[in-house]
Amino acid sequence: MAQSGSNKKVANGLVAVSCGAVLAVYTAGYVRTRAAVDQFEAQAAERRAADPLPQRIESPGTSFRPRAPEPPAAALAIAAKALPNRAENAAGTSDPIASTESEPPREPTPVLTPSPIAIEAPAPAPAPMASVAAATAVQAPAPLPPADHKSEASVAAAPAAPAWKDGTYYGWGTSRHGDIQAEVVIERGRIAAATIAQCRTRYPCSVIEQLPPEVAQRQSPDVDYVSRATQSANAFYFAVVDALSKAK
Amino acid sequence: MPVRTEVAMGTLVTIQVAGGGSEAGVDGALERAFGWFHEIEARCTRFDQRSELMQLTGRAGVPVPASAILYEAVRFALMLAEETGGAFDPTVGHRMEARGFNREHRTGEIVRSRIAQEDDVSHRDVRLDPDRRTITLLRPLTLDLGAVAKGLAVDAAARELEPFKDFAIDAGGDLYLGGSNPRGEAWCVGIRHPRRDDELIASLRVSNQAVCTSGDYERRTPSAGQYDHGQNDDGRNDAGHHILDPRTGATAQAVASATVVASGAMLADALATAVFVLGPEDGIELLNRLGVDGLIVTPELERYETGGLCHGS
């Protein structure tokens, strides 16, 4: 049973790789599941407590859920991402916070339109957002700098957005229903177009077909939520964030 | 003692939680455990053109970003292919199709990849990029992760059930036994006699280990007869079971049943398949080299085994 040393090395590697593979798969799945759970909790929390919200945005490092003393970083990012949801409740009113507060909690409506506070939401906590995007390495923060959340400036204007490098970039976004690859074209430093390059979600990507044009319209990955397709919408969002991170 | 059975990956999957942990949370853990089977099947199946695996097939020549599931499964399969000199090879998918192993187990629909694959493709025609986590097929080919994906699902499910300590997962012969059985003893696994349906050829005691058996008596081609009269029209003896020797394209003949006991089901299942192809002597040598235990039975019912098996009844 004499074996060469090199054989042994490969052989031991095989057993190690099999263990590592299970761990990698389980961890990737775990992160995904956790993100979805946190997102759900964050959305619920954010509808419950409207008042503390401005503070959350200004100081993302502090606890944003009084009942959860140590919110996981991922939940923070998700909460920020979830802001459009609550902002939508206030769309068309001059005071989003007051308006939301006056309304009882309710289910998200089919398409949610972000207000000015929505767009800045991802900026304060970009790094945790990356971890939510599961196993794909999303390093870069959301492209827009933190803006004053009370600003009434139009989202689409976003003149302060950093210039991206021209080119075509791809990114992956993950959700528990599957992955989406986004293609983002940057021309003259602005998002010229965004499309779904690959749809590997359990459901057809036609359910979120209205989202890609929004990326160019808003110069931001912060697309609407889609009722009954929140996972796909999130996967697309993370895919655009990933793609834009490569355009830095 | 919660027991649940579902259909996944073309077989019945049964999970039994024997106790140890509290009852609370068992339902959620079972839900997630079965979730892994469906998730991994959805990504790695050859039987759905929309699966991540089959989308890869249509994109030869380009690096394709892969999910953690697909990437890790392929990575492990390629490594075992290298280790066994091609006796195990995940690129046999096309030949499996050609043999009639192309029917979706739920719908009965025939699935065929729309590519012309040359017969001499091998695992060396697949490239991985660990930094970008992409898979590149250098030539058109169909990957078959049958011997890997099911085991991976069992292992992921086992992790979900770890808090309950004592549990058993049976996915059509891929077993993982956690802790001890309801009587507080190590689990006892019977290994079926390859030629006599209602007899066992061995009983093994295992705990926190996977046991997988590859037999020539399971998953026969639609045209094949019984093992004892498996003659093809051209007179060649061809048992028509589901394990091909990737090096020759012919059905592997030297082993009737190969059982591997290992720390995980992915390792055990893939090794059982590899050993089945390698034959008893080379098979035992491979297992010894890896520090993994196994039992190989030839068609003549000769038994070969490694030293570490724990027999019991």
Image (cartoon, grey):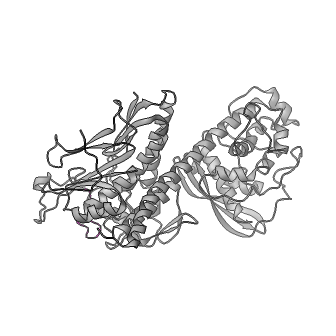
Give yes or no for residue B287 being in the magenta stretch: no
Residue B177 locus on image (x, y percent): 37, 41
Query: Could you say which quadrant of the image residue A40 lies in?
Result: top right
Question: Which quadrant holds the C terminus of chain B?
Answer: top left
What is the magenta segment's predominant secondary structure?
Answer: loop
In depth, the one of B91 and B209 nearer the eye is B209
How many circles with numbers are drawn on the protein? 0
Q: Is residue B237 above or below residue A63?
A: below
Residue ID at (49%, 59%): B71
Name the spot of residue A139 as percent of width and height, x first. 69, 59
In the depicted view, which residue is nearer to us: A95 or B229? B229
Instruction: Tell me: residue B263, above or below residue A34.
Output: below
The answer to if B249 sits in the magenta stretch is yes
**Where does the image place residue A163, in percent across and percent down from the top left?**
80, 65
Q: Visible in this render: residue B169?
A: yes
Q: In this picture, which residue range is highlighted in magenta?
A: B242-251
Inspect this view and state whether residue A230 appears. Answer: no
Image quadrant assignment for residue B307: bottom left
Name the image quarter holding the N terminus of chain B: top left
Q: Which of the pair B169/B59 is nearer the observer?
A: B169
At 62% across and 38% down in the image, what residue appears?
A37
Residue A58 on image: x %, y %:
85, 44
Residue at 81% across, 35% down:
A90
Which residue is drawn at the image coordinates 59% and 47% (left, top)?
Answer: A31
